[in-house]
Amino acid sequence: MNSPIVSAQRVSKRFDKFQALTDVSIDVEKGEVVCIVGPSGSGKTTFLRCINQLESIDGGSLWVDGELAGYRVEADVVHRLPDKEIARQRHLTGMVFQRFNLFPHRTALENIIEGPIHVLRQPRREALDMAQGLLARVGLAAKAGSYPSELSGGQQQRVAIARALAMKPKLMLFDEPTSALDAELVGEVLAVMKDVAATGMTMVVVTHELNFAREVADKVVFMSEGRVIETGSPDRVLTNPEEARTRSFLSAVLSGNSEAA
Amino acid sequence: MSIVAIDIAQMKRAKPRHYGRWLGALVLLLCLGYLVYAFAVGKIDWGTVGNYLFHPRILWAVGMTIFLSVVSMTIGVIIGTFTALGRSSRNPVISSIAAFYTWLFRGAPILLQLLIWYNLALIFPVIGIPGIWEADTVRIMSPLAAALIAFSLHEGAYTSEVIRSGLLSVDAGQHEAAKSIGMSYGLAFRRIIGPQALRIVIPPLSNEFIGLLKMSALASVIGFLELTGTAQDIYYVNTKIMEMLFVATAWYLVVVSMFSLGQFWLERRLARGFVYGGKHG
């Protein structure tokens, strides 16, 4: 009943000679907001992409909403799931990308209704009503007819969040959603994410925004060199870390921030 | 020079003098004038040109040239799309077949391909499915059939590379975004990747089509009555060589202009959402 939405059991992943993930074990409970922080190249984005099966894992096991992601086990033999099954598993999770990845040939509204109409097979009328509601929720009701190229980065990312929410996911994944934004646009995207978190959505957020993590996360995971170094409440991991590597990462980030300010 | 607070908006502006342009235009005009003169005094019977421009045989030939090109291009683009997708297939059998097909039909001269298809009866006297339907190859392989097959396969090989480059030009993030909202590969291709690739491939495909329109003249060697061949057939009889070649040239220009307009319209439609030049922040 209370099984976690995401359960990673000693997940490993390698790209050719590069070991991207080693023994990563993370549980995400329903309604939880988990922030993954760590230096670049630490495997946090790779882990997120494994949850959404944009990458497949090599070892361990990854469970999403009670199903083994990407594989089927039959009499101790592992079978890769067919693409159709993977597509079905995938739309339980919404994904927000660092570079937005809106469809440039569709308006903001059309970006949002694309999945509901063609994947969920919702009636057009219904999908349009829901999309208008979502646009209003991210503060872009007036931009329904704008193409992505006519929107600022912050606006594009808010449309991307609405597009992911339109699939009614059980889990939202955010891959460094504010890293590609100009500093003055970061706040509007974080505000929308806080709003989504407040509705009880389960979220896994890879981010460099430590203040956001402190304020919104139920749990913070610090990763380095493909491993989970420590996990705990934001206060524990971000204020009183036990591990030396976490401390050195935090002091590097904080001094960087103070220089920028 | 000392600094003075002048305002150039309040001053008279010197007009730039484009000596080079005027000289160039003059030379061009002289050349053009000479050409017109040469054509006027040359042995060209302009009356014959006018008489044959809308001659039923010429009009039929224009229709046949357009028909052959449009049908071959359509089939070619369909084959080319599947070949382009096949090239990037994870299945090694499919990707090898696609690569081999492109290599063969892009490598062999189109003139030879036309002749080989037309003379297919020399290798396969009878075609069909044994016991169900069979026919003499000579009867089936008419000049039109041979030309359609040869040009379709040739265009398929050429356009597959154009389409492949169009597909590669679509950002990997678009594939991932389509996947992330649960789209299958086919749906993502139809709704997201295809339309964006189409915008990229329309100019080179139009080029390819215009090339095909003129290349279709080669079908005259197997006796297909297209524009160039028909013009030749007529001047063999009436000996008005230049006149008939002008008639054919005029029609090629008309047809190409027509399709160029279509290309312009198509490009404008597909440009929706894309900003050229200026950048939005």
Image (tube, coloured by chain):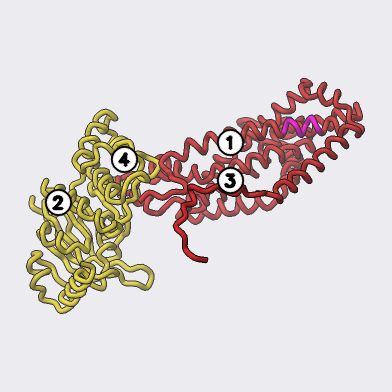
Chain colours: A yellow, B red
Check disc 1 and report its element: helix, strand or loop.
helix
Residue B87, horizontal then vertical, whole percent: 52, 53
Front tag of 2 and 1: 2
- Marks 4 and 1 share the same chain: no
Residue A211 vs B18, above or below: the answer is: below
Check disc 3 and report its element: helix, strand or loop. Answer: helix
Residue A126 or residue B132, whichever sits in front? A126
**Residue at image mark 2:** A194
- The numbered dot on residue B74 is 1
State whether discs 3 and 2 lie on one chain: no
Chain letter of the residue beneath label 3 in the structure image = B
Circles 4 and 3 on the same chain:
no
Q: Which residues are magenta?
A: B246-252
The residue furthest bottom is A244
Residue plotted at (86% across, 24% down) = B48
- C-alpha separation, residue under disc 3 versus residue under disc 2: 47 Å
The residue carrying pointer 4 sits among few (fewer than 14), some (14 to 19) or many (20 or more) residues within 10 Å by Cα, namely many
Mark 2 → mark 4, Cα distance in angstroms: 21 Å
Q: Is disc 3 surrounded by few (<14), some (14 to 19) or many (20+) residues within 10 Å?
A: some
Q: Chain of mark 4?
A: A
State which chain disc 2 sits on: A
Q: Are marks 2 and 1 in contact (CB under 8 Å)?
A: no
Is residue A242 shown left or right of residue B180? left
Q: Which residue is mark 3?
A: B204
Which disc number belongs to residue A108?
Answer: 4
Q: Determine if residue A123 is in view.
A: yes
Callout 4: helix, strand or loop?
helix
Residue B138's label in the rendered image is: none
Tally of marks: 4
